Amino acid sequence: MPITKMPESSLDMVAIAEELLEQYRNTPSPALLLSAVLTANHVVDWHCKENGKKLDEGMRNHLKQQFPEWNVLREISNGLKHMKPNTNQHHHGKLIDREPSWGDDNFWRGYGTGIPHWYIDINEKQVPVESLCQDFLDKYKQHINRTSQ
């Protein structure tokens, strides 16, 4: 069901990112994927604001440990925003455009369609950016469920 309101919370941002991922799964395009990445990256901004915390270096380091997927999404987003690749960080210019192959997390969704998907190298493994994004969103929702009980 399409989102029909502007976001008011971090969970609203999660829902928007998930809707973008679903659209990407139906019609893979860099615009949809990067929109999902940018939206997911900003979930933590909303989370910090909701909880009266600053997103300073200490908080970023804490979040990198808790949500390593988010850190990669953050690096991709920053690379997109600043248009300059940092050799020590993940960057949208380093995304690999290819059809899914056996062993990929998204193999069953995309194999044989002829439609490329985008991957990023993490520790010498090509990881679908879509899966990375969904993993972060799932972990964030689990975190919220645990802390709200």
Image (cartoon, rainbow, N blue to C red):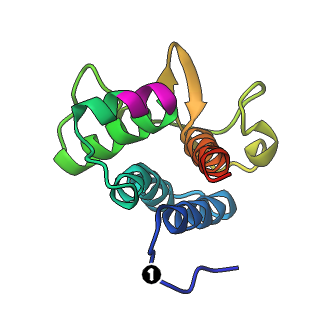
Task: Give the camera-side residue of 146 and 20.
Answer: 146
Residue 15: say if magenta: no
Identify residue for label 1: 6
For this orientation, the residue located farthest to the top is 124
Residue sitting at 54 percent across and 40 percent down? 129
Residue sitting at 59 percent across and 57 percent down? 28
Instruction: Please report the bounds of the magenta region as a residue range.
Output: 62-67
Circle 1 packing at 10 Å, graded few (<14), some (14-19), many (20+), is few
For this orientation, the residue located farthest to the right is 108
Please provide percent x and percent y for residue 131: 63, 41
Task: Give the camera-side residue of 134 and 141.
Answer: 141
Task: Give the camera-side residue of 95 and 37.
Answer: 37
Quarter location, residue 136: top right
- Residue 33 drawn above or below residue 97: below
For this orientation, the residue located farthest to the front is 149
Residue sitting at 46 percent across and 68 percent down? 9
Residue sitting at 42 percent across and 40 percent down? 73
Left or right: residue 105 versus residue 5 is right
- Residue 98 drawn above or below residue 32: above
Task: Give the camera-side residue of 144 and 124.
Answer: 144
Q: Quadrant of the N terminus?
A: bottom right
- Residue 18 drawn above or below residue 132: below
Q: Secondary structure at mark 1?
A: loop
- Residue 79 drawn above or below residue 90: below
Left or right: residue 77 versus residue 123 is left
Magenta: predominant secondary structure element? helix
Q: Amino acid at mark 1?
A: Met
Please provide percent x and percent y for residue 44: 40, 50
Quarter location, residue 25: bottom right
Please provide percent x and percent y for residue 147: 60, 46
Please provide percent x and percent y for residue 146: 66, 45
Left or right: residue 141 versus residue 122 is right
